[in-house]
Amino acid sequence: LAPPISPEPASDSVESPPAPLGFAVVGAGYWGPNLIRNILRCDDADLRWVCDLDVARARKAIGRQSAVQVTESLDTVLDDPTVQAVAIATPAHTHVPVALAALEAGKHVIVEKPLATSVDDGRKLVEVAADAGLVLMCDHTYCYTPTVRHIRDMVAGGELGDIQYVDSIRINLGLVQPDVDVFWDLAPHDLSILDFVLPADARPVAVAAHGADPIGAERACVGYLTMPLANGGMAHVNVNWLSPTKVRTMHVGGSRRMLVWDDMNPAQRLTVHDRGVELSGTMNVEVRRDTLISYRIGDMVAPALPESEALGGVIREMIAAVREDRPAATSGESGLWVLQVLDAVGRSLDAGGALVPLPAAN
Ligand SMILES: NC(=O)c1ccc[n+]([C@@H]2O[C@H](COP(=O)([O-])OP(=O)(O)OC[C@H]3O[C@@H](n4cnc5c(N)ncnc54)[C@H](O)[C@@H]3O)[C@@H](O)[C@H]2O)c1
């Protein structure tokens, strides 16, 4: 399991704080401004540069009055010794060249999901960062939401018991992407959450993928992943760009409790059900009278969870990982595992939905 995420900063610290970490953001399109806003809000971070090939976009992202510098030149950013960390929010196919240049310039790096567009490229980033002793973090944003942190803590603390199944639905009327299918677009979220919350004995060991392209987009627009877990349980992920409604739900069933996460219901995102099914005896038809199925129907609890922007947690975790010289909770390795699953998904689709083995966590 990844190390715990750094907590909210203590407000009553008596030691003098270390100097803020110097950041640059590369890519100021749709997602980059979210990184910019959260770095600017963080007292432990100092945003030095915003870099975009379209420099007007970089300027617009920080506002005309801001003292943050803008440029279209990555070299200018990387030559600045006050920049210690680079957050990359450029399109996926540019992640590797930009991240490699930043690592080779001695900068710590946050890369947007997906880490890269191939397993080999992702592994190269992980190796270069490790050899240079630099933090490589993948922005698996959901892992920094209070809900996912709570689920992870419940699983790790044994409150759910043995994990029996996970059912994740991520569907909406989405933009059909020009360069990736629905698995590469949406499933990294579900996969990174599974990587983050599931214990070693309940990790996915294989994947079978089925996809459909009913609109002739020449890529899967509707997709299903079936993943047997190491302990005999099952995880299932449904991703879809053609749904009339936006659904973001995850059910996690355990032998002690079951939980339902509905991310579209901010008033009650998480409910924990003290319910279960237990079987004693045998299910053999001949001796059915010896079989006892008992249903436990207990309380349902909705934990009070704070609302906080996940990207703020991403930035704080990056700073903590750099200061403590440790891997980030969503490290390059976790980004690589997601790529390995997506690669296996492609091979399963090519093989008509065959089950393809997955590597253990990196
Ligand atoms: N974590 C999340 O939930 C989340 C959500 C949305 C997007 N993303 C990821 O963020 C990344 C960016 O997505 P987007 O939707 O913002 O894309 P976008 O196309 O809106 O923006 C990308 C920006 O990068 C700039 N750019 C491209 N190549 C560059 C280079 N070499 N140097 C400097 N600037 C360059 C472009 O000019 C553009 O402004 C993608 O990897 C995407 O998967 C993550």
Image (cartoon, grey):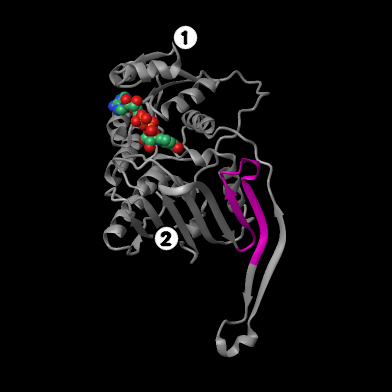
Ligand 1, by image quadrant, is top left
Task: Note whether 23 is above or below 92 in the view shown.
Answer: above
Identified by mark 1, the residue type is Gln
Q: Is residue 272 left or right of residue 361?
A: right
Task: Please report whichever mark, 1 or 2, sits nearer to the chain's N-terminal start.
Answer: 1
Task: Note whether 210 is above or below 83 in the view shown.
Answer: below
Task: Note whether 117 is above or below 237 in the view shown.
Answer: above
The outermost residue toward the bottom is 286
Q: CA distance from mark 1 to mark 2?
A: 50 Å
Q: Is residue 35 magenta?
A: no
Percent of width and height locating residue 19 = 51, 18
Residue in the image at 50% along x and 47% along y: 245
Q: Is residue 260 left or right of residue 19?
A: right
- Judged from the image, the secondary structure of the residue bearing numbered disc 1 is loop
Q: Nearer the viewer, residue 40 or 201?
A: 40
Identified by mark 2, the residue type is Thr
| Residue named by callout 1 | 65
Percent of width and height locating residue 306 = 65, 36
- Judged from the image, the secondary structure of the residue bearing numbered disc 2 is strand
Task: Note whether 120 is above or below 66 in the view shown.
Answer: below
Percent of width and height locating residue 330 = 46, 40
Residue in the image at 32% along x and 64% along y: 354
Q: Nearer the viewer, residue 343 or 105?
A: 343
Percent of width and height locating residue 295 = 67, 70
| Residue named by callout 2 | 226
Label 1 crowd (10 A; few <14 / some 14-19 / many >=20):
few
Residue 126 seen in the current view: yes
Residue 327 seen in the current view: no
Highlighted range, magenta: 255-276
Ligand 1 within 8 Å, label 1 CB: no
Q: Where is residue 10, by image quadrant?
A: top right
Residue in the image at 49% along x and 56% along y: 200
